[in-house]
């Protein structure tokens, strides 16, 4: 811990010295600084170094050598946030993007910037100084598995989205997920496999299930009843509070699920209902958009494995878990859009981003003028846009 500003020269290492150490590197020289904080000695430095200007954050740096990048947690002259979790927003974003296989370093830092600005409400903007040549520079080599090798080189980011989507559903037993994949990628690399899997699931659905004597038994165990509500919630039915006694919302969610699944209408949580829910499994990936009518804040999330995780992530990006109670969630190939004007707002989800935007603007326009799209995203992260 430095006690005086004049100790800096003796007890710290200058950035210039670090850059000189990196000079022998032939392909890449990379320095990452998550240290853009206010100067703790600003008052004393004004007294002892009165002829020099004192600014917030770190000063701008221009590397003298080529193929050198210096990444700041916040651009020159501004400070960085420590965040509320175990890592700062900048460090969290680095963990999420920097080691992605095959991802060019410049794109990775661009995604880091976008995530930090979203999580900090545009109060912190990471910045990268220096330059690289025209070759792709990735910290982690691209994966060479059979699925990636089978994709044409020109497919680019769209291929990565398809592979991510396929890996999230390939072992699932829900035919709707394979239908969603074929709708988005009718000629995709896994289209033939998806059709075979879909045919198999449909054939299995036509086979009469074995008679189970316990299927009609109502569930009395609170733990099993909570599982029913959790699974209904993950299938995008809203059973109300996810614990406690049965409510009208829970019975309504069961009724809607039974109708959509062509099951006998009981409005009751039975062992047969729970078995059916378990066989279906989960839907993924999930996205969500949340909004706070009282404070005007909003947040969004995408690419999550469960609805609960997507809503939690969106509310975190909004500010906290209570700031944005209004929620809309969507999965698979669905997309969500948030439209807003000074006197109205609307959040909608559709199976196509264009349809979602049209619906949101139309609904918002019924109650206000000059409605604009302020946020949009598909469940897999495509069509991402936000005005924060």
Image (tube, helix red, strand yellow):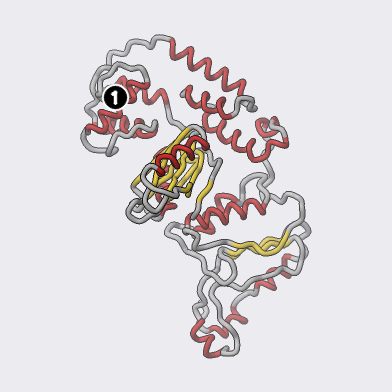
Q: Position of residue 232 (x, y in %)?
A: 34, 31
Q: Is residue 107 above or below residue 56?
A: above
Residue at x 31%, y 30% (from the top left corner)? 228
Q: Check disc 1: other Cα within 10 Å, few if <14, some if 14-19, many if 20+.
A: some
Q: Is residue 163 above or below residue 104?
A: above
372 lies left or right of 272: right
Q: Position of residue 346 (x, y in %)?
A: 40, 43
Residue 53 lies in what quarter of the image? Answer: bottom right
248 lies left or right of 130: left
106 lies left or right of 379: right
The secondary structure type at the circle numbered 1 is helix
Q: Total number of numbered labels? A: 1
Q: Position of residue 207 (x, y in %)?
A: 43, 10
Q: Position of residue 343 (x, y in %)?
A: 37, 51
Q: Is residue 200 above or below residue 48?
A: above
Question: In the depicted view, which residue is nearer to us: 76 or 245?
Answer: 76
Residue position for label 1? 255
Question: In the depicted view, which residue is nearer to us: 363 or 41?
Answer: 363
Q: Is residue 198 above or below residue 246?
A: above
Residue 35 lies in what quarter of the image? Answer: bottom right
201 lies left or right of 151: left
Residue at x 61%, y 62% (from the top left corner)? 127
Residue at x 52%, y 27% (from the top left corner)? 180
Residue at x 68%, y 36% (from the top left corner)? 155
Question: In the depicted view, which residue is nearer to us: 245 or 75?
Answer: 75
């Amino acid at each position: 811990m430095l006690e005086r500003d004049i100790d800096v020269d003796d007890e710290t290492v200058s950035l210039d010295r670090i850059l000189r150490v990196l000079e022998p590197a032939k392909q890449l020289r990379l320095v990452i600084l998550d240290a853009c904080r206010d100067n703790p000695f600003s008052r004393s430095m004004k007294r002892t170094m009165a002829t020099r200007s004192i600014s917030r954050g770190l000063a701008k740096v221009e590397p003298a050598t080529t193929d050198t990048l210096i990444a700041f947690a916040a651009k020159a002259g501004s400070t960085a946030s420590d965040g509320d979790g175990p890592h700062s927003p900048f460090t969290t974003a680095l963990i999420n993007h920097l080691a992605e296989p095959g991802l060019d370093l410049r794109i990775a830092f661009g995604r880091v910037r976008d995530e930090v600005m979203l999580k900090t409400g545009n109060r912190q903007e990471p910045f990268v100084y220096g330059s690289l040549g025209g070759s792709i520079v990735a910290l982690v080599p691209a994966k060479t598995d059979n699925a990636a090798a089978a994709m044409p080189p020109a497919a680019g980011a769209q291929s990565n989205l398809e592979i991510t989507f396929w890996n999230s559903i390939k072992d699932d037993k829900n035919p709707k997920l394979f239908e969603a994949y074929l709708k988005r990628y009718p000629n995709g690399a896994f289209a033939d496999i998806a059709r075979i899997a879909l045919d198999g699931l449909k054939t299995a659905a036509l086979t009469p299930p074995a008679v189970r004597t316990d299927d009609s038994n109502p569930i009395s165990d609170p733990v099993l009843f909570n599982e029913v509500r959790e699974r209904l919630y993950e299938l995008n039915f809203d059973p109300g509070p996810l614990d406690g006694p049965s409510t009208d919302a829970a019975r309504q969610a069961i009724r809607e699920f039974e109708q959509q699944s062509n099951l006998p209408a009981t409005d009751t949580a039975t062992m047969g209902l729970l078995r059916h829910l378990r066989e279906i499994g989960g839907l993924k990936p999930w996205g969500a958009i949340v909004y706070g009518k009282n404070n005007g804040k909003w947040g969004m999330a995408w690419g999550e494995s469960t609805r609960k995780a997507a809503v939690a992530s969106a509310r975190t990006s909004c500010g906290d878990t209570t700031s944005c109670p209004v929620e809309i969630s969507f999965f698979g190939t669905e997309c969500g859009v948030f439209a807003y004007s000074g006197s109205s707002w609307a959040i909608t989800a559709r199976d196509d981003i264009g349809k979602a935007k049209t619906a949101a603007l139309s609904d918002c326009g019924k109650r206000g003028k000059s409605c604009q799209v302020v946020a949009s995203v598909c469940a897999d992260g495509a069509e991402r846009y936000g005005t924060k």
